[in-house]
Amino acid sequence: MSSLSILLATAAVANQPFPLPGTAAPRCLLGAVVRGGAEHRLRVRRGTTARFRHLLPASGPRGVPGVVVALDAACQAAAGGSCSEQPGEDGSRRASLRAGGWLIGTMKRRAGEREKELKKKKLLEELGDNRLPYVTPADADFHQLWKTKYSKLIFRKSDTVPEELHQMVQEGFLTLQKHDCFFRDLVRIKGKDFVTPVSRILIGNPGCTYKYLNTRLFTVPWPIKGYDIKYCSPQIHDACKALIGLNDYLHIEAVKALQGQNLFETTEIKDTTVIDREQNFATSLTAKGSVSKDQSSCCAPEDDYISLKNRTSYNLTLLNYMDPLQMLYLKQEPYFGMGNMAVSWHHDENLVERSTVAVYSYSCEGTAVEESNEQKLKGRDPAVWHVGLKVAWDIETPGLAIPLHQGDFYLMLDDLNMTHQHCVLAGFSPRFSSTHRVADCSKGTLEYIFGQCELALQNLQTDSDSMDLSLKSLETAVVKQVEEIHNEVEFEWLRQFWFQGKRYLKCTDWWLKPMAKLEEFWRKMEIMTSLVLSEVGKGEQIEEQRNETISCFLLVLTERQRLRKEWTARCQSKAAESLPEDQKPECRPFWTDDECNMPLPYDLEEVIANLQNLVQWVE
């Protein structure tokens, strides 16, 4: 066995108790068949260990062979081995490979983060004390660089947008700010919690979510026919309505821009004439989007038009607000010397591949700070907000810094978000922005997670006479699937939602009913976990199947224990305590051992330890 496998196994089983202050240490060890009535559930929880103890060795160290086998198999699979079941393969090993899926995913994510950090470190080392060059529209070579290296960036000046739309959207921003609907997110980066300098709110299709920096945001639903959405005030309703109007407008503009780009790239081969460098900046940036729909549609098949439409059908917008003068500290842009950053270099996460991002900017400019009164310096005007762009991990290509004024918007087309990185450079004045996205909601909608719950609960049945609950199947694959869904509901939905406090109630109570329903499903899954534990404790299964189930179960429960500890600590962190009272995280679900309506304890340390001992005794 590799040293890495042993290290991972040791880390996986190093579980410590973590009751919140003032709570009792859990007494329950393993779950059992749950019969009707709270009194019986409590009696079953306390009596389970006695039924189970005859299967355990009288003494001896706690062994972890089941966990070690599973982790070792997972490491081999990650290194290129196959995770598929092979005829004659040992059953315990098959279960370990399947159950190691979560570990492989975690290892890949962490490897990706390490790779990014190494690239950043290497780039900064190569630069030393030097800075890479960047250009602004004031530079003579700006247009040529934009045309050759940043051609999928489309910019629109504010005078191209209908004045009525400007007015509605900008009033909407101010309304949401007046009602305290912008919130600084508590995000997690490299295992540490940070409060973002930018305040945000997510508005979009009902039931959609958007995840960034390990934080799942839940949409304040914009008004859509067929949904009963009660807003806290008519003004918030009007603000959301204005933003769906902007969303529709930007969708149309993005489709036209993509169509224009397709036509432009076709004619570029025939006509290599370079446009005059002195051409107006706004005109040059918008040239590709000026081709009419009638012209471009003749060059694009109907399937291509549908594809363009799908890649620009924004399902949500992430609104941002920041007042730079209220910030004690802003990070300096490290590669080009562009000055204060409101948002560091990044790719937007969790998007449909090759989808367009549209950003509408509204800086609250006054005559005093609209342009810097200082002597004109080389580079960008520090008083004006800019969007910065660079080719990802490239030290050869100069960057761009493009000024953003009141009502301007820009589009990042096709794969620009993947091949390039962007940042937001702060000016002096407060600024709102509305960033419209085609979020990848394959695993981020209520419809999806309710479907997962329905799938898991198919394995739970109720006896029509006794009303006893039992499991239809104890097959390892079924148990693993149910328990993984259990983890998904708890850590990707319930804890994510309540971690953000009561912030959403400032806009609407729309999410309370679906979250209550999810919590009801999750409670049933807690019962299902206790039923599995009871069955493996009885020892009535075929030994090979029982070993498979326990090995698989150990991995999932160990992950659940680790994540509960992590979320409990996050709710008590200094960063969490710094938030306003109505935004402070709530550790939910949480219960003490005295709460007899729960079949299992919150702290799973002893449950895991007994399963480890059982594996050792059997093997």
Image (cartoon, rainbow, N blue to C red):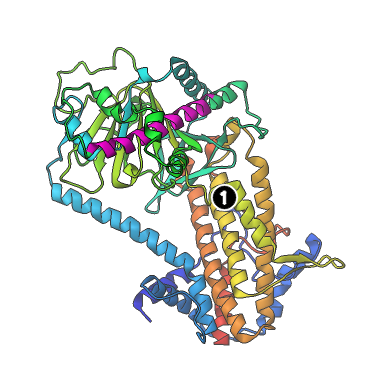
Count up the numbered dots: 1
Image quadrant in which the C terminus is located = bottom right
Residue highlighted by disc 1: 493
Quarter of the image holding residue 56? Answer: bottom right
Q: Amino acid at mark 1?
A: Trp
Q: Nearer the viewer, residue 445 or 11?
A: 445
**What is the x, y in percent for residue 290?**
33, 26
Please report the residue visible at 22 percent of the width from the left and 21 percent of the height from the top.
280
**Vertical comparison of 80 with 414: above or below:** below
What predominant SS class does the magenta segment belong to?
helix
**Vertical comparison of 159 with 610: above or below:** above
- Answer few, some or many: residues within 10 Å of disc 1's Cα (few below 14, many 20 plus, some between 14 and 19): many
Q: Nearer the viewer, residue 317 or 315?
A: 315
Extreme front residue here? 298
Specify whether residue 267 is painted magenta.
Answer: yes
Q: Is residue 369 visible?
A: yes
Q: Nearer the viewer, residue 84 or 107?
A: 84
Image quadrant in which the N terminus is located = bottom left
**What is the x, y in percent for residue 287?**
29, 27
The answer to whether 474 appears left or right of 585 in the picture is right
**Vertical comparison of 134 with 374: above or below:** below
**What is the x, y in percent for residue 119?**
24, 54
**Vertical comparison of 369 with 427: above or below:** above
**What is the x, y in percent for residue 602?**
61, 60
Please report the residue visible at 15 percent of the width from the left and 27 percent of the height from the top.
139
Q: Which residues are magenta?
A: 242-268
The answer to whether 238 appears left or right of 129 in the picture is right
Specify whether residue 62 is painted magenta.
Answer: no
The answer to whether 119 appears left or right of 53 in the picture is left
Q: Is residue 63 visible?
A: no
The answer to whether 290 appears left or right of 47 in the picture is left
